[in-house]
Amino acid sequence: MAFLELDNLTKSFGTHNAVDGLTLSVEKGEFVALLGPSGCGKTTTLQMIAGFVEPTSGAIRLAGKDLLAIKPAKRGLGIVFQSYALFPHMTVAENVGFGLEMQGVAAAERKTRVAETLELVGLGAFASRFPRQMSGGQQQRVALARALVIRPQVLLLDEPLSNLDAKLREGMQIELRQIQRTVGTTTILVTHDQAEAMALSDRIVVMNQGRAEQIGPPHEAYERPATPFVANFLGKTNLVDGASVRPERISFAVSGLAGTVRTRIFQGNHWLYQVDTASGLVTVIRQNSGEAMPGEGDAVHLAWEGRA
Amino acid sequence: MKAAPYLLCVPALVLFAGVVIVPLAMTVLLSFHDWGQYKGIEPVFILKNWQEVLGDSYFHEMFARTFRIAFFVTLLAAMFGAPEAYILNRMRSPWRGIFLLVILGPLLISVVARTLGWALLFGGNSGLVNKALMGMGLISAPLPFMFTETGIVVALAHVLMPYMVLAVWASLQRLDPQIENAAVALGAGPFTVLRRIVLPQVMPGILSGAVIVFALAASAFATPAIIGGRRLKVASTLAYDEFLNTLNWPLGAAVAVLLLLALVAIVWGANRLVERRYAQVFA
């Protein structure tokens, strides 16, 4: 039996179904991402697990127990909010220790566990700072430490990295994954960023209009998208003669689909081409290997595996 | 030297000097002049008025009453205004607007009219509430309201409540909407969330509201004049009486200046306290 089960979970606001019959099983220790555009129901799903939103119908079970019968304050879940929602009037140590204090953990043990967790997220030296005196990335770690210190059964991450700049985000992705592997907490990540979802999770749930379009490991969803929506949402894709082809799978060859290069954009590690063909505009991504590449206006032939 | 910016400031500065600085300076000067029943105001420099105001127990009582009333008004306004603002902040879309209007509406009505309303409800035997309560046999004599400090405190707290609500509401709006959920998820009950998370964060708002309410209550004129009348004077009605009834302008000026100085000292001190206490937490 799965550790966390969402069973036909539905949330309606008036006549609109924000979440529409979502069923999902999460194994213990698994990292699952709910991925989709804004308004797809991913945040509502997270809030139903957390207990801030009541489902219209369906069930949520955690370790076989009905989670909906338990008050939000008693669920013992760790949550990292998009805005971090740190307590600005408390120091970092007080922020992290708050959950333990609520559980009635003795002061001495609280102190050790707070110190351990701050060490885990690399903020050992910042215990007496106030949130306002820290950078966005540091605040993010405090929020993570505050959620992890209570040893939650499930860790819920609501767009945790979206307030960080691109470079920092990449670093935090790696770190977040390492921390999750270390502590082994079952984790649900909500994000609209497909790269983030694919980088972090064991499985992704691609959501659209309240429904799960596809549930599976990231590379499987990328390679074999179940629907055109999934194909489009997980990176760039070309629709050539009814078949979906990823731009990086297309190469320039001596024979194949004939076309003319309309635009060529240099992006550092790769070139981005748009090629006019008889089947329409095709996007091609080629690694920058240092070789000479076709220029704008050149006649080219496109080939890819599986093309008849 | 760039003169243009300074020249552009001149009209505003002239206006400010003309309507604030000059009359204020004249009032201060006036407080050092002499006055007699038959000789009127004499433009000399004496300390008689200040000695009287600072030395006479009659004035001590008056100022003590003024600040006692202001203190209790502030307390009452904070006790009711802060929860009121919190409830208002949690209301949903149409209701929030409606109740904000209900709270701010009284500001559109003259203080005199609002205070007279209290007088109509509680004034002596014929006050509506007193009449009703006596008619029901709940009380045998009318509740004392007119010419009591309690009456002034209640009426002033009602008049000044919107300022407290607005100040607290402003600080509530800076609150992260997820912060209460964050505390709940960590296992905090509703009361703990209020006491440990919400209250400390709106404390600067409550304190700035308290400063406004205190200053306005201590310098209020219309409400103490109507409810307290001649029998129960406060600093502002005292100054008024010295100016317009006794015609002892210099003494009235001394009372007014002392009230101003005391208020500035209290407000400044309170501000310093708030800034020092919360500087680290709230930029």
Image (cartoon, rainbow, N blue to C red):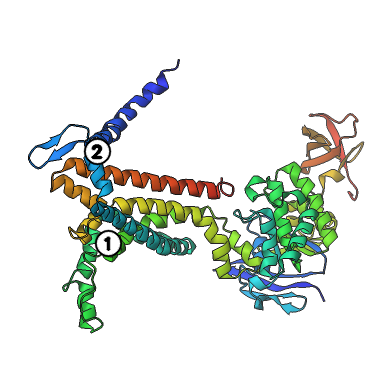
**Mark 1 near mark 2, Cβ–Cβ under 8 Å?**
no
A119 or A174, which is in the foreground?
A119
Residue sitting farthest toward the left: B38
Residue B168 coordinates in the image, percent (x, y): 45, 56
Labels 1 and 2: the sequence-earlier one = 2
> Where does the C terminus of chain B fall, quadrant-wise?
top right
State the residue at coordinates (22%, 40%): B48
Where is residue B189? Give x, y as percent. 60, 70
* CA neighbours of label 2 inside 10 A, class few (<14), some (14 to 19), many (20+): few
Instruction: Write the residue at 20% across / 78% down.
Output: B141
Q: Residue furthest top?
A: B1
Does residue A65 appear to the left or right of A1 in the view shown? left
In the displayed orientation, state which residue is furthest to the right.
A254
What type is the residue that disc 1 sits on? Ile
Chain ID, mark 2: B
- Residue B152's label in the rendered image is 1
Label number found at residue B47: 2
Q: Regarding mark 2 in the picture, which secondary structure is present there?
A: loop
Identify the image quadrant of the N terminus of chain B. Answer: top left
Question: Is residue A243 visible to the viewer in this orientation of the structure?
Answer: no
Both marks 1 and 2 on one chain: yes
Q: Quadrant of residue B49?
A: top left
Q: Residue A3 bears which disc, if any? A: none
The image position of residue A118, as x and y in percent, is 76, 55
Closer to the eye: label 1 or 2? 2
* Amino acid carrying mark 2 in the image: Leu
Residue B85 appears in the figure: yes
